[in-house]
Amino acid sequence: MALEGDLIITDLHVEIDGKEILKGVNLTIKKGEIHALMGPNGSGKSTLAYALAGHPKYKVTRGSINFKGQDVLVLSPDKRAQLGLFLAFQYPSSVPGVSVANFLRTAVRAKAKAKAGDTSTATNADAAAVSTFAAIASGNAVETGQGVVSRRPQGIAGADIGFNPREFRKTLQEKMALLQMADNFKGRSLNDGFSGGEKKRVEILQMAMLKPEIAILDEPDSGLDIDAIRIVSEGVNDLKGPNLGVLIITHYQRILNYVSPDFVHVMLNGQIVKSGGRELALELEQKGHDYIRAEFGVPTTGSNEFNEPIVVGQ
Ligand code: ADP
Ligand code: MG
């Protein structure tokens, strides 16, 4: 039975520019569980991720999202992040002029501040910096042509809100070592000129530093070679535990060799058509997506993946 602390998605319908993409998604994720969401390109996996994050372009027309007993749909993206939701993007954006360390420091401080209930001096930048995804709908969001990102985060006084700079530096060092990131990474502009693998590692680093309760990882494996997949998986496994629920969106079952899911779901044409255990991922890979399309009477339409990063306001 679903409990109040779970992420409960019920009959979720989402449209983009008037076109219905999600057509009634039901999914419950409990803390401690790892779920994998698979399915062909264009089936709506990223749409689910963006709808959970609260991207304004993704309009929920029916259904509900509940987390920790709260109606998530009424919350702005930054409030969702503060509540403990986290989204790692399929296509992370770059933020020229903001270093990895500065971005993370501001994000961790902002979260501590929100937790301490100190909103008196909160700025838009604080909210935006809770995670890149929270920047989506904040006044601090800017268009870069590659997506929406937050502007330079502002400093926040630390000591009074339970932010410990030494602790932060220590954890950052530890997590970067785990993800096999060189020390000079900290000083580089966020995602600016990063390789695909580096961007994915920074997303996992963000998750490690922010300690969310539910993390949605949209294709953390896409474009990565097997060594990078292993490193990213180690990062996820390191955080795994009773206080974290994970939804890994992936096109291939490869990453699931390293991060073992408790549940596997197959999305097709905007709905979860099948759920099962680990074996479902192997079955899908063996038989291919056409088999699942045939099983559910969905015609093969060729590649219709929306491969372009999203820019708000276009
Ligand atoms: P997946 O992640 O499973 O590959 P997506 O959620 O990206 O699928 O896409 C589902 C459908 O929604 C596709 O038909 C895609 O073209 C469409 N779509 C997704 N994002 C947008 C957008 N920002 N604007 C217009 N159409 C979109
Ligand atoms: Mg996608």
Image: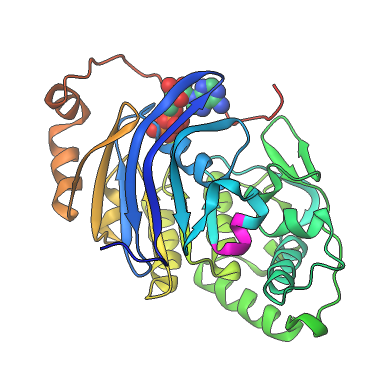
Magenta residue span: 80-84
For the question of whether residue 81 can be seen, the reply is yes
Residue at horizontal 58 percent and vertical 50 percent from the top: 199
The overriding secondary structure of the stretch rendered in magenta is: helix
Q: Which residue appears at 73% of the width and 85% of the height?
A: 166
Residue 309 at x, y percent in the picture:
59, 31
Determine whether 31 is above or below 254 in the image.
below
Side (left or right) of 253 relative to 245: left
Quick check: 200 above or below 143?
below
Across and down, in percent, residue 83 comes to 58, 63
- The foreground one among 75 and 58 is 75
Residue drawn where x is 60% and y is 39% of the image: 55
Q: Quadrant of the C terminus?
A: top right
Which corner quadrant holds the N terminus? Answer: bottom left
**Quadrant of residue 284 in the image?**
top left
> Which residue is located at x 53 percent, y 52 percent?
72
Instruction: Based on the picture, tell me whether residue 131 belongs to the magenta stretch.
Output: no
